Image (cartoon, rainbow, N blue to C red):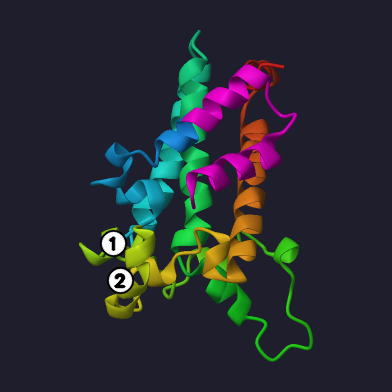
Amino acid sequence: MLIPIHEEMTREALNGCFSPRALEIIIAANRKQDALSGQIGHDEFHFDNNAIEKGFRYINEQRGYVLATLLSPGILSAWIAFGRLIHTAQDFYSHTNYIALWLDQFNGTPRAPRPPEVDPVQKSLLRSPDLRSGKIYFPLDALYFVPFMRGVALKFLPEDSHGKMNLDSPKQGPRFEYARAAAVKRTQYEFDLLKKILTPEMFARFTDI
């Protein structure tokens, strides 16, 4: 998703969960994942190019860094690792077809579910062989991010491209709201998971409250 949306979702999900200084460091680490250095050669940061398993592994690694840091006197690296973790978790819903697969379950039902009802961790979908993410096709996917070239790029990009598949902003249509709702819920889920894993003393240091 776009950087301002990542920040907005993170504040919404974690408001009151961390001290102000901790939350700002987490947000800064989240934002940094979208720097140029995090875009090239790091498909796992964003679940791009069908890096599904690599993305899940990266999330687990960052969670491990949080735990390792809290077993030492340090704390800063735990907040940075958590910011990186939730960026990748948030991108999962906007860069893969998870939302499309989730909504497909309700085809033919009397009422389509609303965005707040989305389940961000449905196991059958997380393990689905149909789960995939957008591929980056250069230079067309680069041109997609140039506003006046977007129409031309979309005309020639394949259906499995990042440009065609992404749900990075409201401009991508109504499914964006499902991706956003899922990303906020997943951010809360990751925080709650650490709350269960950490000792009370470690959790107090982590939240800095």
Q: Name the residue under label 2.
A: 153
Element under disc 1: helix
Element under disc 2: helix
Residue drawn at point x = 25 percent, y = 46 percent: 40
User: In this picture, is 195 found above or below 103?
Assistant: above
Q: How crowded is mark 1: few (under 14 residues within 10 Å), some or many (20 or more)?
A: some
The circle on residue 84 is none
Q: Position of residue 62 (x, y in %)?
A: 44, 35
Q: Residues within 10 Å of mark 2 (few under 14, many from 20)?
A: many
Tags 1 and 2 touching, CB below 8 Å: yes
> Does residue 39 appear in this view?
yes
In reply to whether residue 21 is colored magenta, the answer given is: yes
C-alpha span from label 1 to label 2: 6 Å
The residue most toward the top is 73
Q: Give the range drawn in magenta.
A: 1-28
In reply to whether residue 86 is colored magenta, the answer given is: no
Q: Mark 1 points at which residue?
A: 143
Q: Which of 52 and 84 is in front in this view?
A: 84
